[in-house]
Amino acid sequence: MFSLERFRELNDKVKSHDDFPGFIQELKKTGIDYYEIFFEDGHADYYCTNAVKVSTSKKYDKLTIAEESDDIQFLTYLHLFCEEKSDCFEFYNNCVTVGVERRVTSIEKMTSIYYSKAGKVIFVEKIPLPQSKTSMA
């Protein structure tokens, strides 16, 4: 059963981008179908298999999302984040400056899709399977 507390427990174990696939595998067990993170204020909406939606509160004051998206600059920012050269807040802030509104992560499809404010798909990131069978539980 999904709970924000369980999500936080699992999320706290993610120390690098390499940990993300294992995190997603553990989320599967909680009943989440997909979740959205909104970069303008850091809140998230979680959609569960039993048609329940759970939302978090905002994490910071609202940032302004650029009207026009810059796909190339976004990919640069994503690369820096994946290489752990920026933290989560810096990445979210960078996203809004290049017009990226949110990320939708599908547990079943193992993808993270980044969308512009206008709803355009900016980038589809395929989440690889975990390298080891180590559980995050």
Image (spheres, grey):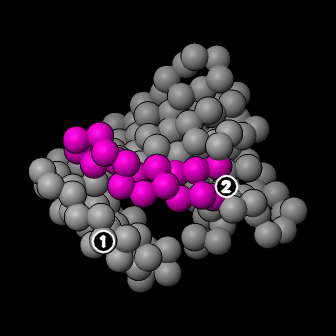
Q: Residues within 10 Å of mark 2 (few under 14, many from 20)?
A: many
**Main SS class of the magenta portion in the image:** strand
Earlier along the polypeptide chain: callout 2 or callout 1? 2
Indicate whether residue 126 is drawn in magenta.
yes
Q: Residue 1 location in percent, x, y?
A: 70, 28
In this view of the protein, which residue sits in the foreground, 77 or 22? Answer: 77
Vertically, is 122 above or below 104?
below
Which residue is label 2 attached to?
23
In this view of the protein, which residue sits in the foreground, 20 or 74? Answer: 74
Q: Is residue 129 visible?
A: yes
Which residue is label 1 attached to?
72
Residue at horizontal 76%, vertical 38%?
29
Q: Secondary structure at mark 1?
A: helix
Q: Which three-letter amino acid code belongs to the residue tagged 2?
A: Phe
Magenta segment: 110-127
The answer to which quarter of the image holds residue 43 is top left
Numbered label attached to residue 42: none
Q: Is residue 41 visible?
A: no
Residue at horizontal 40%, vertical 52%?
114
Q: Residue 15 location in percent, x, y?
A: 59, 71
